[in-house]
Amino acid sequence: MNRISFIVALLLAQSSGFTVWFNNINQADSTAVPILDNTGTSIEGGFGYVAAGTFSTPPSQITNFDEFQIFGEGQSSFNGVASGFFDLGRSAPIPEGTTSSPVGERIYVVIGDGNSLSTSTDFAVFDSGFTFGTENLLGLGAVDVNITSNFLTEDKLIVGDLLTNVDTGLGVTFDKGIQLTTVQQPLAPVLSPDLKDFYQSERGETLSVDATPLDGFPSTFTYQWSYNGVDYPSSLGGRRPIINFSGNTLENGKWKIIVTNDAGSTDHTFDYRVYIPEPVPPTIRIGNYYETSLDQPVSIDATPIAGYPIDFEYQWYLNGSAIAADQGGQERILMIARKTLSRLFAVVGETLSLTLSPPIEALIAI
């Protein structure tokens, strides 16, 4: 066969679908169209990427292939019939539902130099001239897309360079050939400039650092965190883009993230510390006069408005004597429910120090 042939045969079955053949068996015919990479070298078998599909928006100048809907599953590469040619076949399910189907969209052929769309930097895009029809959605009809020198024109080649009189060393000069064009330049990961050199959180306070790149091609990134020069285990999140700190002093130290793709790697180093404030005695704010109706209780709240650490302890005094714990003398809020004129002292303490508050007068009206 002296042409590149993309035969789309539709099957009527419980799950309708295409069977897509990519066929270009060279028989020393000058009308065949070899595919060359951006250096002018024929793409060898086992390399490259070939797919037929549709774009939701007709491409004019393609910078990415996010909108390319592929007919088929997985990837197809040149199979080595001859350098620059391929002979492939695979199953391709029809998109389900009229809203997600590409009915009315043009069918294109995309060829890349990588083993997938995401890893390819150089491409060619060929407009078949056919559209995906309603009959195709129903599993009827067939589409045979041919790329031959007679059919290949500048208008048909959306992306790529059209060559003439191409000699690939196979003993024949081909009338035309396709040379892939660089669409995406390889780029090492680009990290956010917002990443800091120092992070801190209080004890028990969680903190996350996100090292997801802002840019980079290919976008298949790998991550490796290290802690004080030692690779952080993947089981603890060492191979994820985001590292989470729990506010534990065991996490104090120097952290480093290395983000890698096929184009290179980028790293960022920072220090993390759990912030522990200096000890500060408690400060309380309590009124100096309270009154209530007969036998109605008064509650006095001694919650500190400042102080660190915050694991406070309390001791209330009545007329200079400590109120027993079983009578509420060690509670944060003291309940007074007796007819008395008293002078109260509240002692608010914590593990580092004990501080006597200013005197508090409590008057219970009789």
Image (cartoon, rainbow, N blue to C red):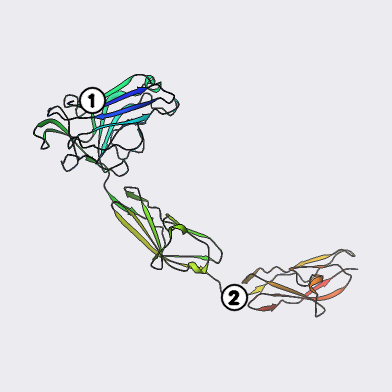
Tag 2 and tag 1, C-beta contact below 8 Å:
no
* Figure quadrant of residue 147: top left
- Where is 246 relative to 39, above or below? below
Residue type, numbered disc 2: Pro
Of circles 2 and 1, the one toward us is: 1
Instruction: Report x, y in % for residue 294.
Output: 90, 65
Question: How packed is label 1: few (under 14 Cα within 10 Å), some, or many (20 or more)?
Answer: some
SS at badge 2: loop
**Quadrant, the N terminus:** top left
Residue annotated with mark 2:
279
Q: Specify the quadrant of the image occupied by residue 114.
A: top left
Q: Residue furthest bottom?
A: 320
Q: Residue at x 25, y 40 (%)?
A: 48
Check disc 1 and give the amino acid type.
Asn
Q: Is residue 256 above or below residue 215?
A: below
> Mark 2 packing: few (<14 Cα in 10 Å), some, or many (20+)?
some
Q: Position of residue 113 (x, y in %)?
A: 24, 41
Residue 263 is marked as none
Q: Which residue is mark 1?
A: 146
Q: How far apart are the alpha carbons under marks 2 and 1?
A: 80 Å
**Number of dots carrying numbers:** 2
252 sits to left or right of 362: left
Residue at 84% x, 67% y is: 291
In the depicted view, which residue is nearer to us: 282 or 211?
211
The quarter in which the C terminus is drawn is bottom right
